[in-house]
Amino acid sequence: MREAVIIDAIRTPIGKRNGFLSGMRPDFMLAEVMSNLIIKNEISVELLDEIIIGHSPLIGEAASEMVKLAGISTGIPMHNLGAIISRQCRSSQQAVNLAAQAILSGDHDIVIATGVEFVSGFSKLLNKNVWKEINKQRVAAERIADIWGISRKHLDQYALNSRQRAFQAKKEGRFEKEILPLDLIQPNGKTIEVKHDSHLTKEYSIEDLSLIQPFFQENGKIHIGNSGKISDGAGAVLLMSNTRAEEMGLRPRFRILNRTVLGTDPSILYTGLIKGTNEALVNAGINIDQIDIFEINEDYASVPLIWLQETKADPSKLNPNGGAIALGHPVAATGIRMLSTMIHELDRISGRYGLMGVCEVNGIVNVTIVERI
């Protein structure tokens, strides 16, 4: 049976907005992660059928040029520079899904799926329309917290747990296999090596979080401390057909079992992750107790908390190394960040199944299930 399998995945460290990645062009970020995959796995660029790049809507018309520049820097032939997709938070996850579909259909055998976010370089483009869309998400996050009866204290406790898990993972070196260290030239001309996510520098207490002002109203629950941090970053995944991997002597690490996409009411847009999870499990023919790791995007703490309430999943399996609240949310690269973290953790614990879910501002949801081989 023809399968779409994952050979490898890598990502950059996540940088704060206007932080250490702000001086690195997005095409260079892409070139770094793609080159690493190609060299590490000894793949000839001539064998690549296509690269699929998820990018930020902020990049807009510059996306096609960015892809060309990234491809040239990597040495990928121009005729293999394929699809460019912008699906906000789902961009890179959708890139992986499209790569899997191309492989399963028989159109392609070797595809690199990538994602890149460079919010620092496009800060001036964060105009009223962009903030209007972000505010829609914040309103939805407040709304679902009210509907499901989740208190501010509960939201803050979840955020604190996410950070504690991420700090513990960093301390144990769990991120080392997924993060590609970068040599970055500083304004003073010196070069530094960056190999850790920049948000993991300061630990908070529940008291610290309780003092942060909410985004909207005085009695609101959602604030910067229990929300994902919009950040810079890039990631890439090497996918193949199982037959081509076998021919090349490469060991597939995971197979993609299911790709579920659905829409939901944008006023409570995050509820789609609940339905999407249930549909994906049915389509994959497994039950929720068989999943070893869940990666549900932490746009806001209320999102994974209502998901937990409705799915009855084991909380210890949810974002075991922290999520966007702790690590950052490089929007168009978040899907691959989550996938990379999930598969490396599955390897570490010898788990079998992983499920990840991401929702975008318009209420469209992606849920992907992978199986460790």
Image (tube, grey):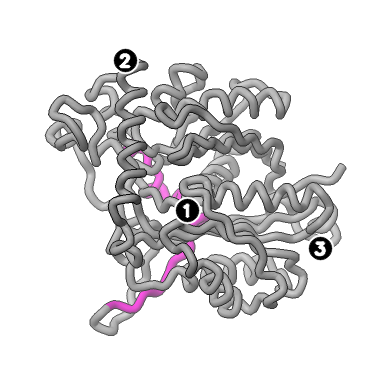
Q: Is residue 165 magenta?
A: yes
Marks 1 and 2, how far apart at CA: 31 Å
Front in this rendered view, residue 214 or 62: 62
| Circles 3 and 1 in contact, beta carbons < 8 Å | no
Q: Which residue is mark 3?
A: 248
Task: Check the image and report above or below for 121 versus 300.
Answer: below
State the image quarter where residue 17 is shown.
bottom left
SS type, badge 1 = helix
Going from N to C along the chain, the mark reached first, 1 or 2, is 2
State the image quarter where residue 109 is shown.
bottom right
Task: Check the image and report above or below for 72 versus 174.
Answer: below
Which class describes the residues within 10 Å of circle 1: few (<14), some (14-19), or many (20+)? many
| Circles 1 and 2 in contact, beta carbons < 8 Å | no
Residue that appears at 37% across and 66% down: 194
Which class describes the residues within 10 Å of circle 3: few (<14), some (14-19), or many (20+)? few
* Disc number for residue 146: none
Amino acid, disc 2: Gly
* Disc number for residue 149: 2
Can you give x and y, in whole percent of width and height, for residue 227 in the image? 31, 39
Amino acid, disc 1: Ala
Region rendered in magenta:
162-186
Amino acid, disc 3: Met
Q: Which residue is mark 1?
A: 332
SS type, badge 3 = helix
Front in this rendered view, residue 76 or 347: 76
Tell me if I can see residue 190 in this picture.
yes
Marks 3 and 1, how far apart at CA: 31 Å
Residue that appears at 60% across and 28% down: 291
Going from N to C along the chain, the mark reached first, 2 or 3, is 2
Image quarter where the N terminus lies is top right
As drawn, is 302 to the left or to the right of 260? left
Tell me if I can see residue 354 in this picture.
no
